[in-house]
Image (cartoon, helix red, strand yellow):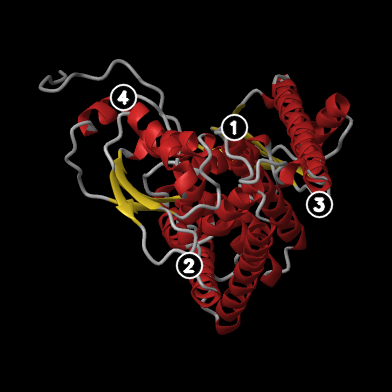
Amino acid sequence: MRLIHVLVPEEREEDVLGVLDERDVDYVVITASGVADGGTLVEFPLPTDAVSDVLGRLHEAGLDEESYIVVGTAETAETSTMELLENRYASDFSPLATDELRSKSRDMSRDPYSFVWMIILSAVIAAGGLLIDSPAVVVGSMVIAPLVGPILTTGVGVVTGDRKMVADSVGFQVGGLVVAVVAATLFSFFLRLTGFAPVGLDVSSLELVTVRLAPTLITVAIGLAAGSAAAFALTTEGPTALVGVMIAAALLPGAATVGIALVWGALVVALGAALLLAVTVLVINAAVIVTLQYLGYRSDGGGSSVPSSGTGIIGLVVLVVVVGGVLFGTYHQLSFERETTSAVEDVLSRPAYGGLDVVAVRTEYDAPSGSRTVTVTLSRTSNRSYPTLARDIQRRIAARTGRSPEVRVRYRDYQVAEPRSGYPSNGSSGS
């Protein structure tokens, strides 16, 4: 429920009240005092979903965009037409009015001091969760990460033409991610220096790290969905806290991965995670902007918004190039994985390897270096060794794909007791 206060100039009073009568809105007219140009203060309650429609019609009737308009929250309202209005707008999706959208997005912003501290704490928790390979701890770090605020205010600033809001919000995004990487780096360095990190840690072997080595079609899709969901949540009267967790899930672990990889000297992992982080930030922001524009938000001045400028066009081109590159890389990686699996099956079909069965074939691709690693896990029921198997698989992969990756073969040994007959059943005796 919303309570609207509008200061109406005398020359527009008849038109404004006519719109309210037409829309079945009950109102109270109060003569304004202490206003230089005079006017009338009109107060009326509305269902939340009706605010955008009614204010839009008032502006069409001549109410200035810069007029004194206050939209407050009301617990309830008892008027002769309230039930009619609630039924009229109950089944309609009506996003927040532009002014409410701007106000809600600003309320999500933090002061720089608290923003930096929340980023530092969340980055430390994320780095710790990655190092101990604990998804629960990593999820906990996402809950407190405040990145959703700057991302949403960036989108709102773009679609409403507020360049200052855009500049401030982009600064918070970039600064926040830099702080997250630095905090994760310092925390990881402290753990390694003091010996509290796991002994003999191989960063690339951590499962939560290996999924963040490079951007893929899946990570792009996650970023687009998270950004669109956040923008949609912002345009409603509901909270955005849970959607903010999804935004943090797409960004914060990647920033922590960069810091951890730098400390352990895994530069390839650090570069891949940094690339993933940059692509994810880009697609999330793009999804927020596109969603808000799809929902009808435009610059208050009626002119073109920021995306229609030269900068916006360049940004769109960059987005298309980046996403296109990710799609191209993902397609080639999937093709390589299919051909690799077929190559392994071809080699194991030879009589010399008849005692082996495939458990899993895993391929890893490091985007910055372009190197590939294939890990083949096999099961066997004897202790027989196969010294040329890895080389045979590598040659077969090279023949099918034109690439010669590093090939690793792991074995899972089993003892098998075959069922035997001729034993007496329980309770019987031999003679």
Mark 4 vs mark 2, foreground winner is 4
User: Measured along the vertical axis of the image, is residue 265 above or below residue 237?
Assistant: below
Residue 286 picture location, percent across and down: 66, 43
- Find numbered disc 1 in the image and state the secondary structure of the residue it sits on: helix
Q: CA distance from mark 3 to mark 4?
A: 56 Å
The picture places residue 113, in percent across and down from the top left corner, at 52, 78
Q: Earlier in the sequence, mark 3 or mark 1?
A: 1
Residue 108 visible somewhere in the drawing? no
User: What residue would you read off at disc 4?
Assistant: 88
| Res. 307 image quadrant | top right
Mark 4–mark 2 distance (CA, rounded to whole Å): 48 Å
Q: Amino acid at mark 4?
A: Arg
Question: Mark 1 = which residue?
Answer: 294
Mark 1 and mark 4: span between their CA atoms? 23 Å
List the residue tagged with mark 2: 125
Q: CA distance from mark 1 to mark 2?
A: 36 Å
Do residues under tags 1 and 2 come within 8 Å of each other at their CB atoms? no
Q: Earlier in the sequence, mark 1 or mark 2?
A: 2
Q: Mark 1: which amino acid?
A: Tyr
Q: Earlier in the sequence, mark 3 or mark 2?
A: 2
Q: CA distance from mark 3 to mark 1?
A: 36 Å
Give the secondary structure at mark 2. helix
Extreme residue in the top direction: 422
For label 3, the residue is 368
- Element type where label 3 sits in the image: loop
Residue 20 as seen in the image, left or right of residue 283: left
